Image: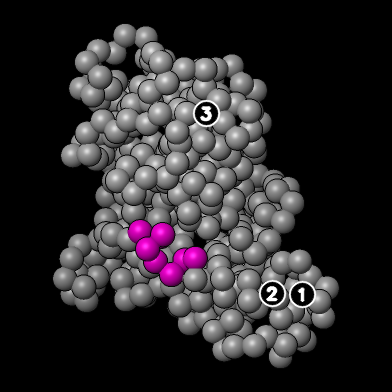
Amino acid sequence: MHEGVTHEGMRDKTTAVFGKAFGDTDGIRVFFAPGRINLIGEHTDYNGGCVLPCALEMGTYCALRPGEGRAVRMYSGNFPGTGVIEWDLDRLAYREDAGWSNYPAGVVWALSGKGLAPRQGFDIAFLGDIPTSAGLSSSASIEVVTGYALATLNGWDIPMAELALTGQDAENNFVGMGCGIMDQFSISLGRAGHAIFLDTSDLSYEYVPLALGDYCIMIMNTCKQRSLTDSKYNERRAECGRALSCLAQAAGVKNLCDLDEEGFEAYKHLIKGEEELKRARHVVYENGRAIKAKGLLAEGDFAKFGLLLDQSHLSLERDYEVTGVELDTLAGAAREQKGVLGARMTGAGFGGCAICIVEKGRAHEAMHNIGEAYYRKTGYRPEFYITDAGGGPVEL
């Protein structure tokens, strides 16, 4: 089980990381942005649909100090082997050799494109307590904390929704990952104790209290490393685009999620290709599940909410084909435990994490049993975290 570290403790650790990289810590400022989980509504955000994520208490910390000239120096305590990576404010372009630092560099590039170029270079050190490549949005977290820190340092008044769009711009057009808006949005606008019901077609949103009573959300990490830009994520997005092109004119829609289940069934014969049909079916029905889930959480009907999680995972496994043996094993083992109401993968898939709704008093027993079942199947151990819904970015 993940043992949470306080903001104060992580602030001190981040300060120490900065000192290790840049020699001293005079004049630094320290910031935090959370990671996220998505409760339900998977692969709908780039199809104009609804999602129901929440920010986490875990996240990414950065220590920042203005520098001299036009050099930006970046260091990560999570990737110490890469050393300090240097960028030039006047020559920002994706670099294969720059690894993780392309994400914060992309944010600087995206801000500059909005007329918000930093006046001078700076030194920045990062430290995160989100497991890397776990599907808990470590990339979006580093994007948001970078944007928030630079906006605060330079006195830029950037609305949180615009900060989210800046992070998405960086990931889409600098890094080359075709993500939707959910991750950056839920991190930028996170509210403690609440999920966010977001309609990605127009960015309208509302906060939904995440008051689970005797239950809690347990995150189950497959510990299978993955890179979304190397996965089939962009391929899935292209398949959805092809399905939409078959439907758009006849059905009068701009996004797949403009269709409800009844409308999809009426027009699905127009979709050319079995793969495209399956992808579109998942997206439309998953959007319906996200809308239902908001109401069930508000009503406190956690049993029916758990059933929606099960249905979501099955659809992601069979129609969207993004689960795999690790995620299927975790979700399947979780469903067999006493006190578990439902389980599914969360995030893009291809590894990463699953979640389940479990009775608090049975959580540790469930962890043990799920862990043993997973080890027997895969030969390695999962990790478990129980964390409440956290807030958005802050200066510490």
> In which quadrant is the C terminus drawn?
top left
Q: Which secondary structure, mark 3?
A: helix
Expressed as whole percent of the image width and height from the top left, the position of residue 241 reads 63, 71
Q: Which residue is mark 3?
A: 148
Q: Residue at x 61, y 59 (%)?
A: 45
Q: In front here: 93 or 302?
A: 93
Q: Amino acid at mark 3?
A: Tyr
Q: Residue at x 47, y 28 (%)?
A: 90
Q: Three-letter amino acid code at disc 2?
A: Leu
Residue under label 1: 248
Q: Residues within 10 Å of mark 3 (few under 14, many from 20)?
A: many
In the image, residue 211 sits, relative to residue 190, either above or below, namely below
Out of 316 and 104, give the one closest to the viewer.
104
Image position of 174 (left or right of 376): right
Q: Is residue 170 above or below residue 359?
A: above
Q: What residue appears at the point 30 percent right and 25 percent down from the top-left corner? A: 14
Q: Secondary structure at mark 2?
A: helix
- Look at the numbered disc 1 and give the secondary structure of its residue: helix
